Image: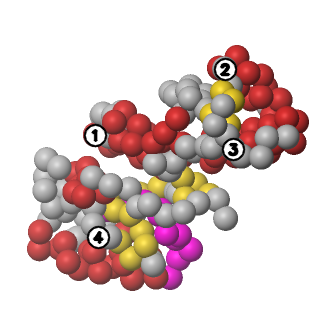
Amino acid sequence: MKRYANFYDLTYLFDYNNQSYRDFETLPREYSEEYHNKVNEYLKNKAFKDGDIVFIGHTYETRQEYGFYPIKDHKMLSSIFDTGDFLEIPGVYYKKAVEAMNNFWDEFAGDPDLVYDDNIKELKEKGMWSIEKDIAANTIQNKFRKSRGYAEWKYNPERLNSEGYFNDLSFGKTKRLSLKTINKLIKLIN
């Protein structure tokens, strides 16, 4: 089943000497292990799904972006910005989570660019960005097969340009569609 990953700010679970995470704006090293255990215990009892992303903060004072963790099997894995990768889980897309993370980061740190264009480009290239593009590509594929009767559709996500249209789409060995024809097909499904 296809779905968007969600983003959650879990810093409300932070309670160190009756102070909140916002009081510190960093994770005290002496509280780190206890806090991680508390968050992982919380994740076990809630409806988080694989690929969801949580923010809990980090002990590195000037690198709070390392405080974003992906969830798998109701546990936090290594920080996204420590490893540099989002989880590749079939049917999980990150557009909405990334938008929420950027909005959160803008409010928290005054910087709207937590997840950079290069990261987003990589998610798009891997087919992990948007359900709509995936659905649109499949719908175009089915409409083309039905309307023109071609037996083979060769679709590769890396052939999508920045507007979501196919750059070099070939059918079988000899047929090619122009961008104009692709645009007409896209209008059919909208």
Query: How far apart, in angstroms, are the residues tagged by discs 4 and 3?
Result: 55 Å
Q: Give the residue type at disc 1.
A: Ala
Q: Mark 1 points at which residue?
A: 109
Q: Give the residue type at disc 4.
A: Asp
Q: Which residue is drawn at 56% across and 74% down?
A: 47
Q: Which of 13 and 68 is in front in this view?
A: 68
Q: Measured from the top left, where is residue 114 in percent x and y?
A: 32, 40
Q: From the image, which quarter does the N terminus lie in? A: bottom right
Q: Name the residue under label 2.
A: 178
Q: Main secondary structure of the magenta part?
A: loop
Query: How far apart, in angstroms, are the residues tagged by discs 3 and 1?
Result: 46 Å
Q: Which residue is drawn at 49% across and 39% down?
A: 158
Q: Tell me if residue 124 comes above or below residue 24 in the rendering.
A: above
Query: How far apart, in angstroms, are the residues tagged by discs 2 and 3?
Result: 15 Å
Judge the density around disc 4: few (<14), some (14-19), many (≥20) Cα neighbours within 10 Å.
few
Q: Tell me if residue 167 comes above or below residue 100 in the rendering.
A: above
Q: Measured from the top left, where is residue 132 in percent x and y?
A: 66, 42
* Magenta residues, start to end: 45-57
Q: Which of 26 and 85 is in front in this view?
A: 85
| Among the two numbered marks 4 and 3 on one chain, the one whose residue lies closer to the N terminus | 4
Q: Which corner quadrant of the image does residue 78 belong to?
A: bottom left
- CB of mark 3 within 8 Å of CB of mark 1? no
Q: Which corner quadrant of the image does residue 20 belong to?
A: bottom left
Query: Can you tell which of label 3 and label 1 is closer to the viewer?
Result: 3
Judge the density around disc 2: few (<14), some (14-19), many (≥20) Cα neighbours within 10 Å.
some
Query: Can you tell which of label 2 and label 4 is closer to the viewer?
Result: 2
Please, what secondary structure does the residue beneath circle 1 have?
helix
Q: Mark 4 points at which residue?
A: 15
Task: Give left or right: position of 129 versus 76.
Answer: right
Q: Residue at x 34, y 36 (%)?
A: 118
Q: Mark 3 points at which residue?
A: 153
Please, what secondary structure does the residue beneath circle 4 have?
loop
